[in-house]
Image (tube, grey):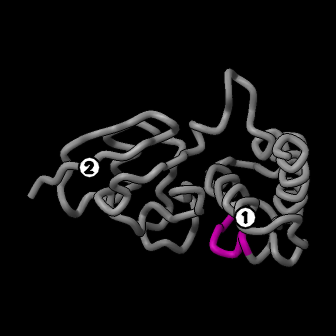
Amino acid sequence: MKLSVSLTVNGKPVSAEVESRTLLVDFLRDRLRLTGTHIGCDTAQCGACTVLVDGKAVKSCNVLAIQARGQEVMTIEGLATNGTLHPMQAAFKQHHGLQCGFCTPGMVMSAIGLAAETKAPTETQIREALDGNICRCTGYHNIVKSVKAGLEAMDEVTP
């Protein structure tokens, strides 16, 4: 059964017909070709598919596309502005918060979701916010350092 879905993705209105069982991650990757949102586990365990839905970090492998109807979805591709990295992306680059990069989009989106929920989080709060994101390459030290720096940079940009 095909259903109509209209939403905003990275600031642009999008409308399409989708199967009722289409996951948001598949809609973003297959229909919109936004492949920065990764598929890791298909069970909402790894966080590689994390996007922002109305500003909240959501694992898109656990949400139907139709459930995002009328909402604002932001993917990793929508963060940079005119070729300038978002402060969180820049912090991950500057503080070596990535290695292979597979988990990085989900980590960045989770960190930005944290910024919307908590002003000046502690290291413990940062680690708790990233708890649902798995990285197989690092010990998380530089990821936490990157998130902390990114949150500080975001705070400087946003009054």
Residue 10 picture location, percent across and down:
51, 38
Quadrant location of the N terminus in the rendered image: bottom left
SS for callout 1: helix
Residue closest to the eye, 27 or 39: 27
- Say which residue appears at 76% left-offset and 60% top-offset: 115
Tell me if mark 1 has few (under 14), some (14-19) or many (20+) residues whose alpha carbon lies within 10 angstroms of its own. many
SS for callout 2: strand
Residue 153 picture location, percent across and down:
88, 46
Q: Is 130 within the magenta?
A: yes
Q: Which residues are magenta?
A: 129-135
- Say which residue appears at 54% left-offset and 45% top-offset: 75
Q: Amino acid under label 1?
A: Leu
User: Which callout, 1 or 2, points at the residue further toward the start of the chain?
Assistant: 2
Mark 2 — residue? 5
Q: Amino acid under label 2?
A: Val
Q: Given the current orientation, which residue lies at the most extreme top position? A: 82
Q: CA distance from mark 1 to mark 2?
A: 27 Å
Residue 75 seen by the camera? yes
**Res 114 label:** 1
**In the figure, 25 relative to 14: above or below?**
below
Res 46 quadrant in image = bottom right
- Say which residue appears at 71% left-offset and 55% top-offset: 112
Q: Main secondary structure of the magenta part?
A: loop
